[in-house]
Structures are given as structure tokens and as C-alpha cells.
Image (cartoon, rainbow, N blue to C red):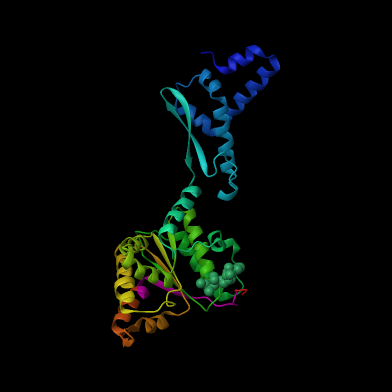
Amino acid sequence: MDPIGKSIRKLSGGDFEKRFEALIQDVLRDGRIQAFLTENKDVTRDQVERHLSDLFQYKKEWDNCDHCPGLDLCPNLMKGYQPSLSMQREDIQISYHPCQLKRRADERKRQASFIKSLYIPKEIVAVTFDDIDEDNESRIEAIAKAMQFSHETVPGETGRGLYITGSFGVGKTYLMGAVSNALAEREIESMIIYTPDFFRELKQGINDGTYQDKLDMVKRAPVLILDDIGAETMSAWVRDDILGALLQYRMMEKLPTVFTSNYDMNELEAHLSYTNRGGVENIEELKAKRIMERIRHLNEEVTMTGENKRRF
Ligand code: ADP
Ligand code: MG
């Protein structure tokens, strides 16, 4: 079959020919297309002409990706998809695959549909360290430590994390949004869990049979962010069977955990000592100490102070 290019050229005048040639040269100048042609030396000029619109589309979409405005504003033909070129039955083939942002958003949705206490409110999902103002020294320290952690941690190699303490509204959760996004830029997956909801959810999970899967998913997160630990009602079961087991696993696997809390470490230890069983208060200081030993060993305590940033 005659390539379309040739047929059209026969039909139209020289001006078209010039424009067509310019288009071809434009496409052939593209770095990615050049790389493809270098890898596939058998590609003929006819094939390039026949697939000119595919190649043009390929170039255009990758140009979009090079100036990515974020997934929501993705201008590609299929939002969140990038083209790739391959040779199929000795012909050029264009296909589409989800980009890194799309894959991450899908993964988050998948996890969030399963784990309800997973945090993904819009206001913290998009936060970066650039958004965070350093209005006093203790904030600067917390932000600097969080930034250093986000840039340096290697899950599986070091289980070292942080323990950010500070009063209600100073911006601990907000900061965790920036941590999660900075980690994502290094392609490190993280989960921000609202701890009181998570413990409640696990309790319900015992009845509906999802307990083990939920616990497993969270305990295996490359970086786990336990937001607002200490805000939950403590029970021996939560402390020993959930928190204790989860931290034990993460310590063995060298997976870092970041905590945020209104309590400092000493206060959290006291909180973990008091449990309630059937209306009877128990004080189990030793068990609390054991858990705190793990947390103290691996997590640096950083105090964050400042004004309450909550507007309502
Ligand atoms: P905490 O978790 O310490 O109680 P949050 O992170 O929830 O505090 O912050 C309280 C409120 O202030 C939230 O509405 C959050 O969006 C906002 N906020 C926190 N830090 C900042 C910041 N650096 N810049 C702008 N808004 C912020
Ligand atoms: Mg918070």
C-alpha cells in the first residue's frame, strides 16, 4: 500500500510537500524519537511517514510531561498517561501507560478505599516544604529535621524516624503532608495514618474479617506516619497487640516511622501505662516502658511550638 504521505503529496502542490517535510524534520529532531530510531535501526522513512501523526502526538505529549502542571491539569489526550514507542510485527507502535503521578494517585485511592483512617484530605496532599513558613526557631528545627529525614531516609536500611511533639494546631499534620510529598519525589511510598481512627478501624476489622489485612498493609508501609498518637483511648490490646507488634515488625525490617503527638515522649509513656479493661483502670508501667524504649531508640524527639494555625 502506498504510504498516505505519498498519496497526499501526489494530490497537492509543492507547498504541502514543504510543510510535510518540515513536520518530519521536526519530529526527527526530537531527542526521544532519535533514541527510539537509534535503538531500532530497521525503521524506514516510509514507516516514519506513515506514523507521522503518532510520532507527532508522542512528541507533543512528552513535551507536556516535561512541563508537567500536575495530574489535575494534565493536558495529555488521556489524563495521566504517557506514550511509548515500540516495534510490533516490524512496525512502529504507540501505546500509553500511566505516569508516575497517576500511578501514585491510583495507589493512594486503592489504599484509601481499604483503609479509612488513611489521610488524604486535599489541603495536605499537595503541601510541599516551600509552603511551610518558618516563623520561629522551634518550627525551623522541626521543619529542618523533617526535611532532612525526607531527603535522607532509606527504608529497609535504617529504621530511624522522628517524633514531632507540639500542641494542637501548630502544624504537625500539615508538615507530614510535606514529608509525604518529598518522599514521593524520591519514589518512596508513605502512609499518613490518623492513629485514633486506625485503632478504632482495626477493632471493627476483627468483626468484619479485615483486621489482619489492614494491619499488614500499614505495618509494611515503607515510611509510616502515625499522626496524633496519644489521642486514642488506650487499651492493653491496642498497646501490646497492635502498636507493640507493629513497631516490632518495623524495627526488624528497618522501616522508619514518624510520629506526631500532642504529648512528648514522657507523657506518651504515661498515656501508654494507663489502660482500661471493663471499666477497671490498670497501670502497667513496664509494658509502656518497653514500647517507649523502641520509640526512643529509633526516633528523635523534636518539639514544635508556634501559634495555633487553626482558623476555626
Ligand atoms: P496539628 O496537626 O499540629 O494540630 P495542623 O497541621 O492540623 O496542626 O494545622 C492546623 C491548621 O493550620 C490546618 O488547617 C493547616 O492547614 C494549617 N496550617 C498548618 N501549618 C501551616 C502552614 N505552615 N501554613 C499554612 N497553614 C498551615
Ligand atoms: Mg494534627
Number of marks in the rendered image = 0
Residue 71 location in percent, x, y?
55, 49
Residue 226 location in percent, x, y?
42, 69
Residue 312 or residue 92, whichever sits in front: 312
Residue 138 or residue 280, whichever sits in front: 280
Residue 286 location in percent, x, y?
29, 83
Quadrant hosting residue 137 = bottom right
Relative to 53, is 38 on the left or the right? left
For this orientation, the residue located farthest to the top is 10
Report if residue 229 lies within the magenta region.
Answer: no
Quadrant hosting residue 203 = bottom left
Residue 83 or residue 160, whichever sits in front: 83
Relative to 5, is 285 above or below? Answer: below
Relative to 78, is 186 above or below? Answer: below
Residue at 59% across, 18% down: 5
Q: Considering the image in quadrants, where does the C terminus appear?
A: bottom right
Residues shaded magenta: 295-309
Residue at 34% across, 72% down: 243
Report if residue 296 lies within the magenta region.
Answer: yes
Relative to 233, is 71 on the left or the right? right
Residue 153 or residue 209, whichever sits in front: 209
Q: Is residue 258 shown to the viewer in this render?
A: yes
Residue 1 location in percent, x, y?
51, 13
Q: Is residue 140 shown to the viewer in this render?
A: no
Residue at 60% across, 48% down: 73
Quadrant hosting residue 65 = top right
